[in-house]
């Protein structure tokens, strides 16, 4: 059986470093299975910056979280649409575009890989 998987990009909320989140489709949901540091050049070369995925995103039981700070969750910036790790803050600041906003939960999201 073939596994449908992809990589989406995020930035660490504390270190501002780029990392990839491997996601895999399971029963119609996207499951975060692994996270790893990645250089921007390699992310672009692999096409991770062009990934667009819609759905619900959950963490696997053994998902390690952000490789820099260990945070397991993420938010999608309402301004630029890019991902950042998230640790429950009421107000967040996007490490891609610098905009701040209140956070809220959503059952489904539309995420983009990055774009530089």
Image (cartoon, helix red, strand yellow):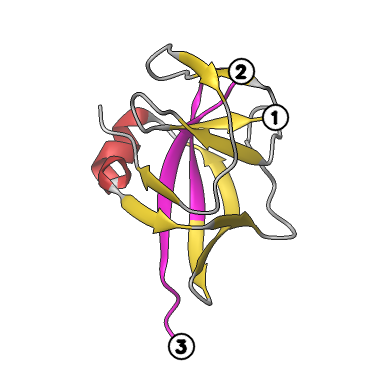
At which x and y percent is residue 17? 51, 23
**Secondary structure under the numbered disc 1 in the rendered image:** loop
Q: Residue under circle 3? A: 1
Query: Distance of mark 2 from mark 1, alpha carbons?
Result: 11 Å
Asked if residue 39 lies left or right of residue 72, the reply is left
Say which of 8 and 111 sits in front. Answer: 111
Q: CA distance from mark 3 to mark 1?
A: 35 Å
Q: Find residue 87 and name its label.
A: 1
* Magenta span contains residue 8: yes
Q: Looking at the image, tell me whether mark 3 or mark 1 is earlier in sequence order.
A: 3
Find disc 2 in the rendering and name its residue.
Answer: 91
Left/right placement of residue 63 relative to residue 105 reads: right
Q: Is residue 40 magenta?
A: no
Q: Nearer the viewer, mark 2 or mark 1?
A: 2
Magenta span of residues: 1-22
Measure the alpha-carbon separation of dots 3 and 2: 42 Å
């Amino acid at each position: 059986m073939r596994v449908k998987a992809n990589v989406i990009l995020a930035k660490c909320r504390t270190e501002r470093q780029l990392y990839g989140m491997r996601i895999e489709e399971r029963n119609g949901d996207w499951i975060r299975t692994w996270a790893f540091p990645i250089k921007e050049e390699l992310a672009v070369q692999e096409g991770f910056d062009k990934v667009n995925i819609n759905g619900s995103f959950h963490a696997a039981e053994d998902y390690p979280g952000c490789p820099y700070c260990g945070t397991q969750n993420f938010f999608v910036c309402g301004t630029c649409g890019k991902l950042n790790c998230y640790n429950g803050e009421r107000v967040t600041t996007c490490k891609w575009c610098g905009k701040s906003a209140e956070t809220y939960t959503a059952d489904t999201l539309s995420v983009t890989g990055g774009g530089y």
